[in-house]
Amino acid sequence: MDLQLRGKRALVTGASRGIGRAIAETLAAEGAHVAICARGEAGVDEALASLRAHGGRAEGAAVDVRQPGALDGWIATAGQALGGVDVLVSNVSTRVDPSAPDWWRQTFEADLEQHVRAFEAALPVLKASEAGSVVFISSIAAVMTQLPPYEIAYGAMKAALTSYAAQMAAVHGPAGVRVNLVAPGPIFFEGGWWDGVKAKSPEMFKRAASLSALGRMGAPEDVARAVAFLASPAAAYVTGASLRVDGGMVRTVNF
């Protein structure tokens, strides 16, 4: 299937590694021009070299999306560099140490507020596109009531993000901007959170993987392919969707 992404201009946050990196690579492989950001400059530079090998334009910068003005400024600069924005993939996420005295505030900033700021900053240029599309990256933690204590705030923010995405789809659909959300389950990649679990608590890792109906962890590419479809003109009549990419781990009917 031709996703009709060739020549489209995409912004991907948190794209130097893991899910974000796989998303950027997948979009670039489909012919999109891509701008990325992440906190580490070295990681951004390494990712850009790989993205440019696909033949399209690739721009990037080291940005902490939680810093006031930093994210808005990057979106404006990246949009100008690409000559517009057709796709925004808001991917950044983190797990804040629950022992921090401002645990909930930090989690709010990292897992909800920065997504809202990214959307609002990109919205004017997305409206100017003929194929404006936004994909938020959430988590199945949004729908789970049995979470480890250190993910309570994280899960609540992901639930709020899911609601926000659906609301924005309804509000901005008349302007031609589609808004969807992808909720991954456990995703394994080298250097990622589950890689640390595998090294420190192999039994916990095995139990988590076995919860999937497919009996394995997901890979970043599993998420990236779903995101590329939802972001693309091939999904032109899909908006307000929340797509789980969890190997069937959450076993409920998803109306």
Image (cartoon, grey):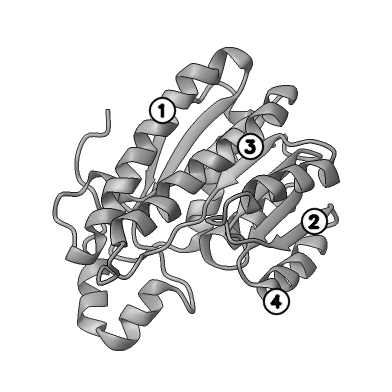
Query: Which three-letter amino acid code belongs to the residue tagged 3?
Result: Ala
- Distance CA(mark 4)–CA(mark 3): 26 Å
Secondary element type, mark 1: helix
Residue topped by disc 3 = 121
Residue topped by disc 2 = 58
- Distance CA(mark 3)–CA(mark 2): 20 Å
The residue most toward the left is: 146
Question: Do we see residue 189 in this rendering?
Answer: yes
Q: Which residue occupies 63% across, 30% down?
A: 123
Q: Which residue occupies 80% across, 59% down?
A: 54
Secondary element type, mark 3: helix
Tell whether label 1 touches label 3 (CB within 8 Å): no
Q: Earlier in the sequence, mark 3 or mark 2?
A: 2
Instruction: Locate residue 171 relative to residue 41 in the image: left or right.
Output: left
Q: Earlier in the sequence, mark 2 or mark 1?
A: 2
Instruction: Locate residue 164 relative to residue 155 in the image: left or right.
Output: right
- Distance CA(mark 3)–CA(mark 1): 18 Å
Residue topped by disc 4 = 42
Q: Earlier in the sequence, mark 3 or mark 1?
A: 3
Q: Of discs 3 and 2, which sits in the foreground?
A: 3
The percent coordinates of residue 97 (x first, y second) are 31, 70
The percent coordinates of residue 32 (x first, y second) are 76, 45
Asked if 105 appears above or below 188 in the picture, the reply is above
- Distance CA(mark 4)–CA(mark 2): 15 Å
Q: Earlier in the sequence, mark 4 or mark 2?
A: 4
Q: Which residue occupies 37% across, 81% down?
A: 196
The C terminus, quarter of image: top left
**Image disc number at residue 166:** 1
The residue most toward the top is: 174
Secondary element type, mark 2: strand
The N terminus, quarter of image: top right
Asked if 230 appears above or below 32 in the picture, the reply is above
